[in-house]
Amino acid sequence: MSRNFQEVRRLALRGSLLAAVGLAALGAQPALAQKDYPAKPVRLVVGFAAGGPTDVVARAFADHAGKALGQPFVVDNKPGANTIVAAQAVAGAPVDGYTLLFGATNHSMIPALYQGRVKFDVVRSFRPLCTVASSPTVLVVGPGMPARSLQEYMDQARSRPGSVTAGTAGMGSSGHFATEMFARAKGLKLNHVPYKGAAPVVTDLMGGQLDSSFATLGSVLPQVRSGKLTALAVASPKRASLLPQVPTFAEAGGGDYSADVWYGVLAPAGIPDGVAQALERVAVEFAKSASAAEKLHGLGMDAESSCGSAFAQRVAGEVASYAQIARELNLKAD
């Protein structure tokens, strides 16, 4: 394991400990009785446009939560600035549980890309409540890349440093960070090619203009199933339920490498414990429901419920990891 990767892991652990301390402080506040909440509609802010994967999951959760708690959960789409617009709206909201953020892994990237340019702290300004879904990152190659296993892919990258292309949905995207973290962990030099969105990446992969991509499973699943693209490994602790024949990076010789994309609910820091617990319970129920599983599988996702301190530690660890990579790349958003 490279020294850079060890440093990223060390920073992630330190961030996790800080998050745990902060969560304990929040737990000292008086709890609002669960039966008193909600007494009016709840606003669920989403940092993506209507119709996209995150919005679809958010609306499914909102429908379930509204029925479970007896008040409407109203989705409020606020796309812009890599989800900063939505996060700012929630960070500055009253801490009563009536304004929540439905976010994704992009939330953890904000400090890395906008250092010193936002008015909130991703770790301290929010209380992560619960994830409800995850999408594994998968390394796929097109017909122009001769590698048909992860080991062969790494051999190709080592024999042709800087020549193997890896396309992503853009600079600072989850795929970009996943690409760089893996390359650094294995001592590889890949040629990152940023696109404007996932669709053109898939097109160029199939056309042979691009060698590979670290992509969310949902964006490439149809092409993998049809044989137009080849999945070499899944960057997840376990195999993807939708591609059970594809090994994890660990199984394929890629080491302890995970780059799952999470989707979940966060609240402004200071939300009463009773309200937080009610929302966490509903999120877990949603993730365990058959209707959620069907909806999520259609998006290339799996249901997941990681709540409370575990979710907070995950966010804090990601913030530290992404910040380290951004510093090494001198990466900043415009």
Image: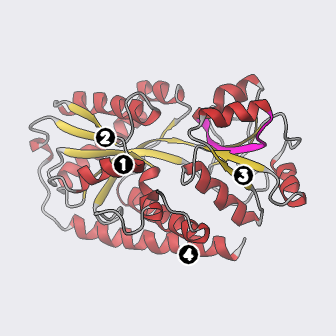
Dividing the picture into quarters, in which one does residue 163 lie? bottom right
Regarding mark 3 in the picture, which secondary structure is present there?
A: loop
Q: Nearer the viewer, mark 2 or mark 4?
A: 2
- Of 278 and 157, the residue lying toward us: 157
Regarding mark 4 in the picture, which secondary structure is present there?
A: helix
Looking at the rendered structure, the kind of residue marked 1 is Cys
State whether residue 52 appears in this view.
yes
Q: Which residues are magenta?
A: 208-217
Instruction: State the CA–CA distance, disc 2 to disc 3.
Output: 35 Å
Which residue is label 1 attached to?
Answer: 130
Instruction: State the CA–CA distance, disc 2 to disc 4.
Output: 34 Å
Which quadrant is the N terminus positioned in? Answer: bottom right
Instruction: State the CA–CA distance, disc 1 to disc 2.
Output: 21 Å
Which residue is label 2 attached to?
Answer: 78
Q: Which mark is residue 80?
A: none
Dividing the picture into quarters, in which one does residue 158 lie? bottom right
Q: Nearer the viewer, mark 1 or mark 2?
A: 2
Regarding mark 2 in the picture, which secondary structure is present there?
A: loop
10 Å crowding of disc 3: few (<14), some (14-19), many (20+): many
Looking at the rendered structure, the kind of residue marked 2 is Lys
Which residue is label 3 attached to?
Answer: 249
10 Å crowding of disc 4: few (<14), some (14-19), many (20+): some
- In screen coordinates, is 62 left or right of 211? left
**Residue under the image location 85 percent in, 41 percent down:** 145
| Residue 231 x, y percent position in the rendering | 74, 38
Which residue is label 4 attached to?
Answer: 10
**Residue under the image location 80 percent in, 58 percent down:** 162
Q: Earlier in the sequence, mark 2 or mark 4?
A: 4
Q: Nearer the viewer, mark 1 or mark 4?
A: 4
Q: Based on the picture, tell me whether residue 214 belongs to the magenta stretch.
A: yes
